[in-house]
């Protein structure tokens, strides 16, 4: 009996996560585009830890390359694209400064585009899992890079590279006011 309850609980938890996902995405977009007043310590911490995370991610993808084909290459390309996107995001960020205070507002369209890329990759991952489960590996191979599991690493690299570049450039840009 306790095992049946555990299975029901896990299924209910999965259903709740699936139903709340659109709300979580909307909240991520809303928070990602809000006007913010950055704390000095957090801005500096992000400027150091996010690039370190990107390097750690690439190191982990070097190990993952042993098990998943093209993992490191896709992750590195994703990080490079994320660094370029982070530079674009930094250039499009609106900064307001007054004596003793500074605020910044990220670009709404860029935040929306990154959110939609993540959503598309999650849906593609579900599709890939379904096709692999059905045994349609040839169909996935016909899609080229979009059919490979390493595409997930490219999107992760894109998001991580974006945030790493954005944090470093934001610290550099806001440093004189913080």
Image: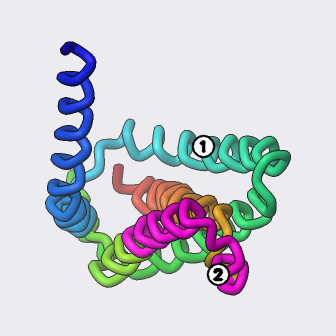
Check the image and report above or below for 178 versus 98. Answer: above
Check the image and report above or below for 39 versus 91. Answer: above
Q: Which comes before the other along the chain, label 2 or label 1?
A: 1
Horizontal side of residue 24 vs 46, given as left or right: left
Locate residue 10: give its quadrant: top left
Which labelled disc corresponds to residue 53? 1
Q: Quick one: 135 or 129, which is closer to the camera?
A: 135
Horizontal side of residue 169 vs 9, given as left or right: right
Question: What percent of the width, then of the height, locates residue 18?
Answer: 23, 55
Q: Which residues are magenta?
A: 118-143
Q: Is residue 5 visible?
A: yes
Where does label 2 land, which residue?
139
Question: What percent of the width, then of the height, locates residue 75?
Answer: 69, 61
Locate residue 36: give its quadrant: bottom left
Q: Residues within 10 Å of mark 1 (few under 14, many from 20)?
A: some
Question: What percent of the width, then of the height, locates residue 141?
Answer: 72, 78
Q: Quick one: 15 or 119, which is closer to the camera?
A: 15
Q: Residues within 10 Å of mark 2 (few under 14, many from 20)?
A: few
- Across the whole image, how many numbered discs are drawn on residues? 2
Q: Quadrant of the N terminus?
A: top left
Check the image and report above or below for 108 versus 3. Answer: below
Q: Quick one: 73 or 52, which is closer to the camera?
A: 73
Q: Quick one: 33 or 37, which is closer to the camera?
A: 33
Horizontal side of residue 162 vs 23, given as left or right: right
Specify whether residue 134 is painted magenta: yes
Q: Is residue 35 visible?
A: no
Helix, strand or loop status at disc 2: helix
Helix, strand or loop status at disc 1: helix
Specify whether residue 128 is painted magenta: yes
């Amino acid at each position: 009996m306790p095992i049946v309850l555990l299975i029901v609980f896990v299924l209910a938890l999965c259903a709740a996560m699936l139903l709340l996902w659109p709300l979580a995405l909307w909240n991520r977009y809303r928070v990602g585009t809000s006007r913010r007043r950055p704390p000095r310590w957090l801005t500096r911490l992000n400027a150091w830890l996010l690039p370190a995370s990107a390097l750690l991610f690439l190191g982990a993808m070097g190990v993952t390359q042993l098990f998943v084909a093209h993992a490191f290459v896709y992750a590195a390309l994703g990080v490079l694209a994320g660094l370029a996107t982070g530079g674009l995001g930094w250039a499009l960020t609106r900064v307001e400064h007054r004596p003793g205070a500074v605020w910044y507002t990220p670009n709404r369209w860029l935040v929306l585009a990154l959110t939609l890329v993540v959503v598309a990759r999650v849906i593609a991952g579900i599709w890939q899992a379904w096709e692999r489960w059905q045994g349609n590996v040839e169909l996935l191979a016909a899609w080229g890079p979009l059919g490979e599991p390493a595409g997930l690493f490219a999107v992760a690299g894109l998001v991580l590279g974006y945030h790493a570049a954005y944090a470093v450039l934001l610290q550099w840009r806001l440093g004189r006011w913080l």
